[in-house]
Amino acid sequence: MNFCSHCGSRLTCGTPPGDDRERFLCTACGAVHYQNPRVVVGCIVAAHGERVLLCRRAIDPCYGKWTLPAGYLENGETVEAGAVRETREEAGARIEALTPYRMFNICHINQIYLMFRAQLADGRFQPGKESLDVGLFTEGEIPWDDIAFRVISETLRVYFRDRAEGVFPFLISDIAPAARQTIDHRQ
Amino acid sequence: MNFCSHCGSRLTCGTPPGDDRERFLCTACGAVHYQNPRVVVGCIVAAHGERVLLCRRAIDPCYGKWTLPAGYLENGETVEAGAVRETREEAGARIEALTPYRMFNICHINQIYLMFRAQLADGRFQPGKESLDVGLFTEGEIPWDDIAFRVISETLRVYFRDRAEGVFPFLISDIAPAARQTIDHRQ
């Protein structure tokens, strides 16, 4: 963020009066430009009892990897409507019986994920323009080594565990930055 | 939004290739400026069993009205940490035993509220700089006609109902725009 989106002047960084953290400030027009986390809404769609719907990404990042339908919540949209829209766009699927299921803090990229559980409404699905493929997978068929994002593999992991126990509590957890691979040079 | 925050050029509105809705576009540098809902995190803090903590606002909007501790989630912050921070800042109170309680879509102002339940940790509280006063209220003492925002009175309403029933399900609901007062001139 370099320029004021209101008046076009160059921005500075500073702590506004009464605030306790640095913001982007416009000394020309006085605007304070706050930056806040974005919400990603998504869905774990069940069908035929034991299968879930995965999409294979046709876009970067993680082109070719598998994911759950999910994307940024838009202005003017409820979280449920966002999850329905993303599932329609990415998986060509209609869903029903949405239930809030899990939330994830991904602080290092300023994202909050809200994942719903839902049912496939009519058994139909097809790849949207952001997907190479869409399919239904049993737990044993999940391509664990080819899941696009850790938040997705974590959602799938807790889902199958909760399903085995027959309870789906609404819980919030954190996705920490991926651990760096360290190489031991002492040998 | 008038100018590109990246290069300072004047913005236009248009639908980017592959998108299906209008965005703010920079024809000079190619940046697309997405706008997304912001998350407000807050807390219904219980103490002495039946009382809840309210703050009287020292800032506009709704100066002088009562509210629950709540505010915008910051970048780099978990939703729980945001609710803890807002309660410390506005009510000078430490809380514990946070449980996600209710979510509200407020689409007409592009806000998502996430309200937790929590316990007052040590019985202490005092007004922060955004509060004129802080106090503990029984259900019968709640100043219903002087609550700052509808999402706050709705949170309090469902909380006391749920508490009476002894169950606190996690649910999502919508806050619609306030109905305009219409005056019938036909008389």
Image (cartoon, coloured by chain):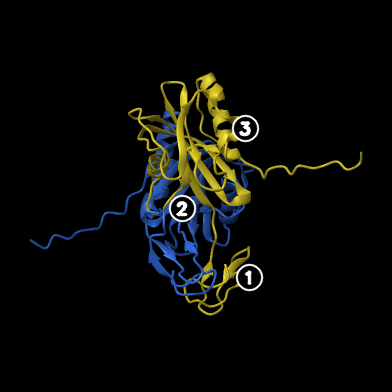
Chain colours: A yellow, B blue
Q: From the image, tell me which residue sits under label 3.
A: A145
> In this rendering, is residue B94 above or below A55?
below
Q: Mark 3–mark 2 contact, CB under 8 Å? A: no
Question: What residue type is disc 3 on?
Answer: Asp
Q: Nearer the viewer, mark 3 or mark 1?
A: 3
Q: Residue furthest left?
A: B187
Label 3 sits on a secondary structure element that is helix
Residue marked by disc 1:
A14
Q: Chain of mark 3?
A: A
- Can you tell which quarter of the image residue B184 is in? bottom left
Give the amino acid at mark 1. Answer: Gly
| Residue occupying image coordinates x 50% and y 76% | A8
Quadrant into which the C terminus of chain B falls: bottom left
In space, the residues marked 1 and 2 are separated at their CA atoms by: 29 Å
Q: Is residue B122 visible?
A: yes
Residue at image position (56%, 41%) is: A104
Which chain hosts label 1? Answer: A
The kind of residue tagged 2 is: Thr
Tags 3 and 1 in contact by the CB under 8 Å rule? no
Q: Is residue A20 left or right of residue A167?
A: right
Disc ID at residue B67: 2
- Tell me if mark 1 has few (under 14), some (14-19) or many (20+) residues whose alpha carbon lies within 10 angstroms of its own: some
Q: CA distance from mark 3 to mark 2?
A: 48 Å
Q: Identify which residue, A121 or B40, lies in the foreground.
A: A121
